Image (tube, rainbow, N blue to C red):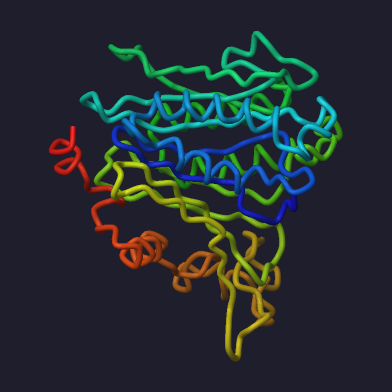
């Protein structure tokens, strides 16, 4: 898959919100994992729209797809390895409970099983936040890269930042730098990309999530995450492939760029120093000012879905269940 593309999905169901990412097979022949993931997850919503039940059904469909899809049947087992990670919160408890789910055909959530080639069946592994919480509770997992000791100090520092409840954007920046270090290390063998998509899902589901795209150079197009909504039969929708670029007089000009040193010339081509252009606190972040939640809500309205699907649906869920 092109490194410069969306690789993230947000999944909202009756009792959970998850950020989803995958590692392994991205595309083979006519099969595209990102497209298949969103469509299949949406189809797995009925009949109960429950998070675990949906993931269990999704796991079965993954096994079926990889065994029966014509192009995938031709793929070598080494190239068919795929892990799909769900990270978020369950809302059937108070307070909401942190949860991880891994759907994979070659590794487990506890790192005790890692196969060199894809297995015939996908397995689902689950892990939830312990209750009562231990001191300095944390819930982390990494998938798709075997050398977990590489740059371990950076990763552990990010964990400490989470436990100490530092601002989410600071943690995000730390993890972006960590992933890029791994990407540039020879042992990654070009299996880890440098163009990074990030999703932040607040514990409070009344708060909307946010997404960010971190390129390494100026880009004329920026990529937004996919959304799968499976709350009930009336609110069952997948939204995919949302890209943004300039149009009109600015068509073809950069819309997004990397964080730079203050005195470097800005990535946008203005000729100004970064600190006086897109790096200025007065100018704002390198990304254009776009209300992603508003974009999705507009699409949902066009589909006849009410605004509260985005995060404020506790009342409706209690009526439906």
39 or 229: nearer the viewer = 39
Q: Is 116 drawn above or below residue 293 in the view shown?
A: above
**Residue pushed farthest bottom?**
249
- The total of numbered circles placed on residues is 0
Rendering coords of residue 290 (x, y %): 44, 68
122 or 17: nearer the viewer = 122
Q: Is 268 drawn above or below residue 211 in the view shown?
A: below
Rendering coords of residue 264 (x, y %): 70, 68
Q: Is 227 drawn above or below residue 307 in the view shown?
A: above
Rendering coords of residue 60 (x, y %): 55, 24
**Residue pushed farthest top?**
112
Residue 23 horizontal side relative to residue 234, left or right: right
Rendering coords of residue 17 (x, y %): 37, 38
Residue 104 horizontal side relative to residue 192, left or right: left
Q: Is 170 drawn above or below residue 267 in the view shown?
A: above
Quadrant containing the C terminus in the rendered view: top left
Q: Residue at x 51, y 27 (%)?
A: 159
49 or 227: nearer the viewer = 49
Q: Residue at x 69, y 79 (%)?
A: 269
């Amino acid at each position: 898959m092109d490194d410069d593309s969306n690789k993230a999905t947000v999944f909202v169901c009756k009792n959970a919100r998850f950020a989803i990412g995958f590692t392994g097979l991205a595309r083979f022949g006519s099969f595209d994992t990102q497209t298949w993931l969103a469509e299949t997850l949406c189809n797995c919503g009925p009949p109960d729209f429950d998070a675990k039940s949906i993931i269990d059904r999704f796991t079965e469909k993954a096994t079926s797809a990889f065994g029966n899809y014509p192009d995938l049947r031709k793929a070598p087992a080494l190239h068919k390895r795929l892990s799909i990670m769900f990270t978020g919160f369950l809302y059937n408890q108070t307070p909401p409970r942190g949860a991880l789910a891994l759907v994979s055909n070659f590794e487990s959530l506890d790192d005790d099983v890692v196969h060199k080639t894809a297995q015939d069946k996908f397995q689902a592994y689950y892990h939830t936040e312990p209750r009562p919480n231990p001191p300095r509770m944390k819930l982390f997992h990494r998938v798709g890269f075997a050398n977990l000791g590489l740059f371990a100090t950076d990763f552990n520092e990010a964990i400490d930042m989470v436990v100490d409840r530092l601002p989410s954007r600071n943690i995000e920046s730390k993890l972006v730098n960590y992933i890029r270090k791994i990407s540039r290390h020879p042992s990654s063998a070009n299996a880890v990309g440098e163009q990074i998509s990030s999703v932040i899902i607040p514990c409070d589901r009344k708060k909307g999530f946010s997404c960010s795209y971190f390129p390494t150079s100026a880009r004329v197009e920026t990529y937004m995450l996919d959304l799968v909504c499976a709350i009930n039969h009336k609110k069952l929708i997948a939204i995919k492939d949302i890209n943004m670029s300039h149009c009109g007089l600015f068509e073809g000009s950069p819309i997004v760029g990397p964080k730079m040193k203050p005195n470097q010339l800005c990535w946008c081509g203005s000729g100004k120093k970064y600190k006086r252009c897109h790096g200025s606190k007065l100018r704002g972040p390198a990304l254009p000012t776009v209300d992603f939640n508003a974009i999705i809500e507009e699409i949902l309205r066009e589909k006849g879905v009410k605004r509260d699907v985005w995060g404020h649906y506790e009342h409706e869920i209690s009526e439906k269940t």
